[in-house]
Amino acid sequence: MAEKNFSFSTFNAHASDGIFQSLIDCNQKSKKPIFICIGSDLVLGDSLGPLVGTFLRARNVKSYVYGTLNYPITAKEVDYARTYLKQMHPDSIAVAIDAAVGNADDVGLIRVVNKGLKPGLGVDKNLGSVGDVSIIGVVAGKSLQNYNLFNLTRLNLIYKMAEKIADGIEKYLSYFLTNNQFLQNNTFGA
């Protein structure tokens, strides 16, 4: 399958609709979606994933959500998480959510890509990829000291980005469950 890469500005009023449509496009086989929200609550710029997970759990979405502010999944746990997801959800599509660094002009962009992501690249870690689809929020520009930039990221940006992503996922799950009636009888939890 050819790579699909969608980008939306956090400050665009329709970003959540774009995320919703992108997730439909990336899951054309209508596999049950699960969400793995990667990051740490110890570093502001790396808290995007756990914040999205917390928002999704608070909204009681009907899907498995892994990684919240209370129980974060950090980059160093990715190998374990990948193995766990394959064993526990072999027929699902895993959507991985994480913060990223990029070009200075890209700060504030949310990207949805039909392939997994490699957490830790922003701080020069070489870890395996996780997920089948990724949602990446560009929270800082690339620099020689990316770790410092993660600490200087504005909470307002992270919060708005997490809200847009959670809104898009919630719309997607509502659409997905409506159009896949057989799944409504299955119990989702986390």
Image (cartoon, helix red, strand yellow):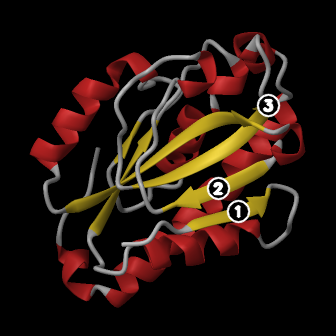
Q: Position of residue 150 (x, y in %)?
A: 74, 19
Q: Estimate the spatial distance between the alpha carbons at disc 2 and disc 1, rounded to whole Å.
A: 4 Å
In the image, 41: left or right of 172? right
The numbered dot on residue 111 is: 2
Q: Amino acid at mark 3?
A: Ala
Give the quarter of the image for residue 146.
Answer: top right
Number of disc labels: 3
In the image, 149: left or right of 168? right
Sequence-wise, the earlier of marks 2 and 1 is 1
Q: Are marks 2 and 1 in contact (CB under 8 Å)?
A: yes
Element marked by disc 2: strand
Sequence-wise, the earlier of marks 2 and 3 is 2
Q: Quadrant of the C terminus?
A: top left
In front of the other: 169 or 100: 100
Residue lying at the far left of the rendered structure: 87
Residue at image point 25% right, 36% down? 82
Q: Amino acid at mark 1?
A: Ser
Element marked by disc 1: strand
In the image, 84: left or right of 55? left
Q: Position of residue 111 (x, y in %)?
A: 64, 56
Q: Are marks 2 and 3 in contact (CB under 8 Å)?
A: no
Sequence-wise, the earlier of marks 1 and 3 is 1
Q: Which residue is mark 1?
A: 7
Q: Position of residue 13 (x, y in %)?
A: 85, 69
- Residue 89, placed above or below residue 169: above
Q: Quadrant of the N terminus?
A: bottom left
Q: Amino acid at mark 2?
A: Arg
In the image, 77: left or right of 137? left
- Residue 76, placed above or below residue 177: above
Q: Which residue is mark 3?
A: 140
Badge 2, how many Cα within 10 Å: few under 14, some, many 20+? many
Q: Estimate the spatial distance between the alpha carbons at disc 1 and disc 3, rounded to whole Å.
A: 16 Å
